[in-house]
Image (cartoon, rainbow, N blue to C red):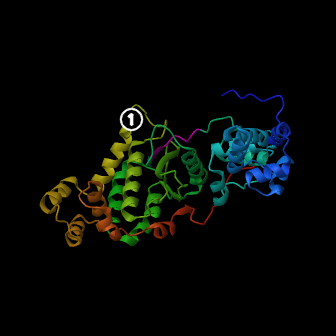
Amino acid sequence: MTERTPAEVFPPSVYIREELEERGWTQADLAEILGVDVSGIVQILNDRRGITADTARGLAEAFGTNAETWLRIDARYRLHSASSRPGTRLRAHIYAKAPVRELVKRGWIDGSSNPDVLAQDVCRFLGIVSLDDTPSPIPHAARKATSYAESSPGQIAWLCRVAQLAPAAPVVRPFSPPKLPELVVKLRTLARNLPDVRRVPALLAEYGIRFLVVEALPSSKMDGVTYWLDKNSPVIALSLRGGKLNGFWHTLLHELAHVKNRDGAVVDYDLSFEEGHLPPIEEAANRFAVETLVDPHHLASFINRVGPAYSLTRIIGFAEKMEVHPAIIIGQLAYRKEISWARFGRQLPSIRELVASTALTDGWGTALPSLIRKD
């Protein structure tokens, strides 16, 4: 849009004085006509008070004009007279790149009232040279509740934090793809009892998979990500966004499927999928997670035999047969709309503190060192 700036802008007082002179009215006369205190008219004529909607309506009726004209004259004068704060444009550019306030709150960047310094901090965090550069997410495969066609600034910032912290996540021995089926079996045995989620980080480390937890940024809707430090060093990071046991196990195995398939090891997503659908690698990862946790044939049999007369007792009995926690069965049934989340939601235990007690964790009031060099 092209903006035109008038050569000279006059305050409303100039036009009001002209109207008064033409009619031979005084300031007191105008105050009487408008039914207001004369001090208010004096302030307007001395440019110390703006034109309100009520005043504009009164002036229009008194002078035979229209209220919009007086509001427009006043707004143009105020805008012309206003001085912009130094750095406003630069700060707007910075905030468009990342959720700055949240990064400062988390301790991911230092933050500064000086916009030039703040710009440097944000660029350093995002791994770009200039704010004019477009941050590139690390090659990855992720589970998230937004479109896969692009990554939001909040998602990119979360991925940057994962990439900064991942090298510090421990591993016991090198990663070996042939041992993944063995790892899956061992993980599956931990899905029965709630306290066993604490053993997951150590078990992944034994098989050469770095594991960490990074709290999701507001509105980023990131659940988990898989990426590779190098071709033999997979990383799984979870946000524990929902904080429930069923979501934890689904997302963990979802990401483990990406490791198994080496998704994200070289390039980012294949975006040749229909709008409104998941990328093929995400659909495959979801199937792997669902079917690893609960045999689909047994689940279908349970649904045909019991539905829709589901009860907590029957769900617990089926979970014991499947050797998983009941929350996992509840999650799969609710996803299929066989039951409502509201009805069984209280049976979904929280796992955030259990997982964070044994995993490299950043968030929920705890900030790890930035690990960003400031050369």
Q: Position of residue 296 (x, y in %)?
A: 22, 53
Q: Residue at x 83, y 42 (%)?
A: 13
Judge whether residue 369 can be spotted in this image.
no
Q: Position of residue 144 (x, y in %)?
A: 44, 48
Q: Is residue 331 magenta?
A: no
Q: Residue at x 74, y 47 (%)?
A: 51
Q: Which residue is mark 1?
A: 275
Left or right, 176 with respect to 165, comes to left
Residue occupying the far left of the picture? 305
Q: Residue at x 51, y 45 (%)?
A: 228
Q: Position of residue 115 (x, y in %)?
A: 77, 47
Q: Is residue 140 magenta?
A: yes
Q: Position of residue 240 (x, y in %)?
A: 47, 60
Q: Which span is picked out in magenta?
A: 136-142
Name the foreground residue: 250 vs 188. Answer: 250
- In this rendering, the count of numbered labels is 1
Name the foreground residue: 50 vs 263. Answer: 50
Judge whether residue 164 can be spotted in this image.
yes
Name the foreground residue: 44 vs 100. Answer: 44
Which amino acid lies under the numbered mark 1 shown in the image of this protein? Glu
Callout 1: few (<14), some (14-19), or many (20+) C-alpha neighbours within 10 Å?
few
Type of secondary structure dominating the magenta stretch:
loop
